[in-house]
Image (cartoon, helix red, strand yellow):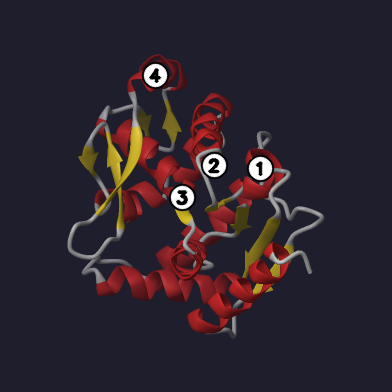
Amino acid sequence: MVVAVDGYSSTGKSTVAKLVAKKLGLMYIDTGAMYRAVTYFALKSNLFNGEKVDEVRLKELLPNVTVSFMAEPSTGKNLTCLNGECVENEIRGMEVSNRVSIIAAIGFVRQFLVEQQQAMGRVGNVIMDGRDIGTVVFPDAQVKFFMTASPQVRAKRRYDELIAKGDSVTYEEVEKNVLTRDYIDTHREVSPLVQADDAIVVDNGNMSIEENVELMVNYIKERSNGN
């Protein structure tokens, strides 16, 4: 079984998908982290000039990029690795967040990572979250969810998360980032963020994580039982 979880940034897709995976014994794949890792690679390689990236140079270097996941020994948490080095903390900051939608809009980057995601999905039962899982990566996924919430709710969640990590940010900065990412994600030419026709819409603006997980787990069980 492939479970596709798409939706807007900061809707808790990764958090919820991880918990669903744990409850149902599925393999969890965070595709957003893969785009963040490539964004971090571009930053470390000095490929950004302001908000523009040197696509020619990135295309030359991309074949040398390997994004993988490893389990943290003490917690079992999935950690994102770039060329064998753990970059989980580095890819979650605002520097990467402000540029990841730019990288994700590049056609050859999406093709490069979609091929990796499809290969991962063929291994076994997986739950995969991102922007185009149910429309492009796995259009035939047995179960599809589309997660949403108001920009203000999502910005507050992201702001609280960053502050808890010790980052120095303002709510206004985070809200602007959320709105900008929404626009880029829904207006890009290649694989824009859209709701698949057969996706279950989950507006979790007034929903706890536990309620969100329970809703999705129950629906997946129904589908897996053939109901």
Q: Quadrant of residue 11?
A: bottom right
The residue positioned 50% from the left and 40% from the top of the image is 123
Q: Where in the figure is residue 58, as x and y percent of width and height? A: 40, 22
Label pair 1/2, CB-CB below 8 angstroms: yes
SS of the residue under disc 1: loop
Q: Where in the figure is residue 77, as x and y percent of width and height? A: 30, 60
Checking the image for residue 138, the label placed there is 1
> Which amino acid lies under the numbered mark 4 shown in the image of this protein?
Pro
The residue positioned 38% from the left and 71% from the top of the image is 159
Q: What residue would you read off at disc 3?
A: 29
Circle nearer the N terminus (3, 2): 3
76 and 167: which is toward the camera = 76
Q: What residue would you read off at disc 2?
A: 121
Q: What residue would you read off at disc 4?
A: 63
> Which amino acid lies under the numbered mark 3 shown in the image of this protein?
Ile
Looking at the rendered image, the disc whose residue lies closer to the viewer, 1 or 2, is 2
Q: Quadrant of residue 216?
A: bottom right
Looking at the rendered image, the disc whose residue lies closer to the viewer, 3 or 4, is 3
Circle nearer the N terminus (3, 1): 3
> Which amino acid lies under the numbered mark 2 shown in the image of this protein?
Gly
The residue positioned 42% from the left and 29% from the top of the image is 53
Q: Residue furthest left?
A: 74
Quarter of the picture containing the C terminus is bottom right
Label pair 3/2, CB-CB below 8 angstroms: yes
SS of the residue under disc 4: helix
Circle nearer the N terminus (1, 2): 2
